[in-house]
Image (cartoon, grey):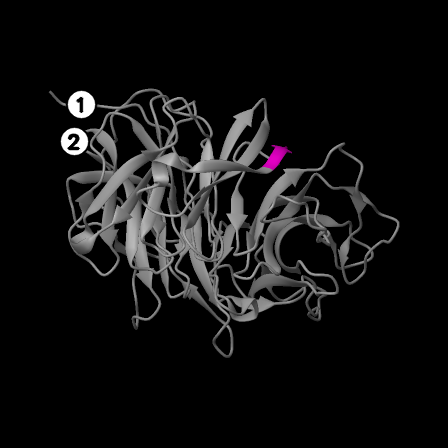
């Protein structure tokens, strides 16, 4: 008898040695089987109708910043896990698994080492978890049960992985940890008691052993805790230690990211209106003030709130820590004014923020002469004007997601981002270690995986 299981679109959880991204599930679908992909040619430009819309989303970088995975497909019904290697000349994105029996994938997570990829895919009408070597090889099926797997996370050393197993897509679930053996084999075991239920998790690197940060939602408020266990054998008896209580996330899909010493997440500013900020640009109106809706929160390993010079943003959507925790890559909205005679406009921008006292912050803007590129990185949203008074360039204010590789030097760390400036979401990579900085079109003009 063919089995089936209810499943929900799951928010991708990124885990690297220096920063682990936590995403909690949002809303679930009703029970259904996976949809059959619809073959179509994509052009990488604006899409004429919603039915033909393709999206390349959820990039994940290895620690080195040289390997990347992302999801690609038509809407949410024909997604494929894709991989890209920046060390390969004239590289093109390729499908992660060669198993044609897997008809679609809803999540893909690259290990910090860049060696392994976890994917959630549909096989025999059931959504399960699979492990695939980045370099190619057999796809190993890790789960065969009728429950729902999600919230994938790799340990900092890439030897362990964790996920949450749910019986209901709208409820919390049990923590399960697995370890990778020789030849891509794996074994798993649950952690904690049968009655313990969590809504999200992330790895925290420590000098020895491992720690898992877990979250439980209660009426819109999250309580984070860390689970400390020294060995694989002791994992089921791991004890939970308090970390952060009463955290009010900025939206329905809160994310927790960690470095070796710090934890960050985006929280709502309460009460609303208690913080105001001004404009940015070259001709700002100092009298104009705007309401701050969210901000990055920074904690040390004990859960103590660390003072942070918040960047001047109205609404922060994503904050990612560097390897040593002294810098944040922040994606958010701010009011930009370049001309005195024109009103300020709300723009989505990237800011490299110092988390230490006296540190500096810098804005990262993507500019091109045409919407199809080539793109370059600039420090100001206000460029020189042409003879007719028009700025002779296009600035990309359509970035919807951004992460950076956790290299030793944040100033040269590779950044992967998703932009909708061409109409359909595209993945690009900013290689700041090169001179000059180069921007690689990872998914542009690629055919969807069939």
Q: Is residue 355 left or right of residue 205?
A: right
Circle 1 residues within 10 Å: few <14, some 14–19, many ≥20 = few
**Residue drawn at (82%, 45%) of the image:** 289
Q: Confirm or deny contact between disc 2 and disc 1 (CB under 8 A).
A: yes
Look at mark 2 in the image and give the residue it sits on. Answer: 124
Task: Tell me where residue 423 appears, x and y as whole percent.
Answer: 47, 47
Q: Residues within 10 Å of mark 2 (few under 14, many from 20)?
A: some
Q: Quadrant of residue 303?
A: top right
x, y percent for residue 356: 69, 61
Check residue 167 for magenta coloring.
Answer: no
Viewer-proximal residue, 371 or 140?
140
Q: Is residue 83 left or right of residue 320?
A: left
Up-down relation of residue 29 to residue 184 (above or below): above
Q: How far is disc 2 from disc 1 in space, using C-alphas?
A: 8 Å
Q: Outermost residue toward the left?
A: 1
Q: Position of residue 361 (x, y in %)?
A: 68, 63
Q: Is residue 298 visible?
A: yes
**Is 245 part of what is drawn in magenta?**
yes
Dot 2 or dot 1, earlier in sequence: 1
Q: Secondary structure at mark 1?
A: loop
Image quarter in which the N terminus is found: top left
Q: Is any part of residue 14 visible from this angle?
A: no
Residue 328 placed where, x, y %? 60, 56
Identified at 56% across, 23% down, the residue is 218
264 lies left or right of 290: left
Q: Nearer the viewer, residue 358 or 54?
A: 358
Q: Which range is magenta?
A: 244-248
Q: Secondary structure at mark 2?
A: loop
Looking at this rendering, what residue extends furthest in the right direction?
287
* Residue 147, above or below 211: above
Q: Which residue is mark 1?
A: 3
């Amino acid at each position: 008898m063919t089995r089936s299981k209810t499943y929900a679109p799951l928010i991708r959880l990124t885990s690297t040695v220096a920063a682990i991204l936590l995403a909690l599930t949002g809303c679930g679908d009703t029970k259904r089987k996976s949809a059959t992909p619809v073959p179509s040619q994509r052009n990488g430009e604006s899409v004429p109708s919603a039915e033909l819309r393709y999206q390349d989303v959820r990039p994940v970088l290895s620690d080195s910043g040289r390997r990347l995975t992302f999801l690609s497909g038509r809407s949410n019904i024909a997604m494929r896990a894709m991989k890209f290697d920046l060390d390969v000349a004239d590289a093109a994105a390729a499908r992660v698994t060669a198993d044609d029996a897997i008809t679609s994938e809803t999540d893909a997570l690259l290990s910090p080492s860049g060696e392994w990829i976890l994917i959630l895919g549909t096989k025999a009408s059931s959504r399960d978890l699979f492990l695939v070597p980045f370099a190619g090889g057999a796809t190993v099926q890790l789960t065969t049960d009728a429950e729902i797997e999600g919230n994938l996370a790799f340990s900092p050393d890439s030897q362990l992985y964790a996920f949450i197993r749910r019986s209901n897509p709208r409820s919390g679930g049990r923590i399960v940890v697995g370890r990778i053996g020789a030849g891509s084999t794996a074994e798993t075991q649950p952690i904690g008691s049968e009655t313990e239920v969590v809504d999200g998790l992330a790895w925290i690197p420590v000098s020895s052993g491992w720690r898992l940060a877990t979250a439980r939602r209660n009426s819109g408020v999250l309580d984070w805790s860390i689970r400390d266990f020294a060995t694989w054998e002791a994992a089921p008896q791991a004890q939970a230690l308090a970390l952060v209580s009463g955290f009010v996330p900025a939206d329905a899909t809160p994310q927790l990211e960690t470095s070796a010493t710090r934890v960050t997440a985006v929280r709502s500013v309460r009460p609303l209106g208690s913080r105001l900020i001004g404009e940015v640009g070259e001709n700002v109106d100092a009298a104009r003030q705007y309401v701050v809706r969210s901000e990055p929160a920074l904690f040390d390993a004990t859960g103590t709130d660390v003072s942070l010079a918040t960047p001047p943003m109205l609404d922060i959507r994503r904050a990612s820590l560097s390897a040593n925790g002294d810098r944040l890559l922040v994606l958010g909205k701010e009011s930009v004014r370049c001309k005195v005679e024109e009103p300020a406009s709300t723009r989505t921008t990237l800011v490299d923020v110092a988390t230490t006292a006296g540190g500096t912050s810098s804005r990262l803007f993507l500019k091109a002469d045409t919407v199809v590129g080539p793109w370059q990185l600039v420090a100001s949203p206000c460029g020189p004007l042409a003879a007719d008074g028009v700025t002779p360039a296009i600035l990309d204010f359509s970035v919807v997601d951004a992460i950076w590789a956790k290299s030793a030097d944040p100033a040269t760390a590779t950044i992967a981002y998703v932009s909708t400036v061409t109409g359909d979401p595209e993945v690009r990579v900013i290689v700041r270690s090169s001179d000059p900085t180069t921007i690689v079109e990872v998914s542009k003009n690629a055919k969807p995986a069939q």
